[in-house]
Image: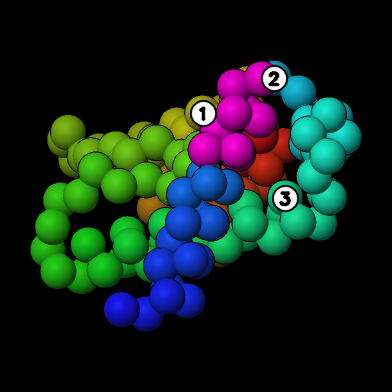
Amino acid sequence: MDTRKVATELRLNQWAVALRERKESGLSVRRWCMENAVNEKTYYYWQRKLREVSCRELVAAQSSGQNSELAPLGWASCEVVSETSAGRGITIEIGKAQITATQSTDMELLGKICRVLSDAAL
């Protein structure tokens, strides 16, 4: 048994609960950290670690052909119901913001925008 791996998974689970509680509390990260005696850098460190693990799990599930319901904390999973025409695109809602993307949308820029909006919504 790899005790280091078990300890890391335990900490990841504890921080997943803490991040979810912070989000559900409606408090800002700074305020939540002050009230819970947590260093903000520690909070963001574990938030980043959880996102990395979630993304790795998603990539692994997709590459193995699984239609996984996994989604990183704060993200929503979705499925394509029907193909859209190239001109119509899709609308993405994150918090109060709406973004419309088409096939010609720069995916790298779209990813950056979604990350910024997601972080702001947390």
Circle 3 sits in a helix, a strand or a loop, which is it?
helix
Q: Which amino acid is tagged 3?
A: Tyr
Local crowd at mark 1 within 10 Å, few (<14), some, or many (≥20)?
A: few
Residue with the most extreme bottom position: 2
Q: Amino acid at mark 1?
A: Glu
Whole-percent x, y for residue 2 in the image: 37, 80
Q: Is residue 91 above or below residue 110?
A: above
Q: Position of residue 73 (x, y in %)?
A: 48, 42
Place residue 36 in its image quadrant.
Answer: top right
Location of the N terminus (image quadrant): bottom left
| Magenta stretch secondary structure, dominant | helix
Residue range (magenta): 17-25
35 and 103: which is toward the camera: 35
Calculate the distance from the C-alpha at mark 2 to the C-alpha at mark 3: 16 Å
Nearer-the-camera pick, 84 or 72: 72
Q: What whole-number distance in Å separates the C-alpha atoms at marks 2 and 1?
A: 19 Å
Determine which residue is flagged by label 2. 26
The mark lying in front, picked from 1 and 3, is 3
- The residue lying toward the viewer, choosing from 17 and 1, is 1
Magenta residue check for 71? no
| Residue 30 visible to the viewer | yes
Q: Residue at x 60, y 39 (%)?
A: 19
Mark 3 highlights which residue? 43
**Where is residue 101 drawn, in percent x and y?**
47, 43
Which kind of residue does numbered mark 2 sit on?
Gly
Residue 64, placed above or below residue 103:
below
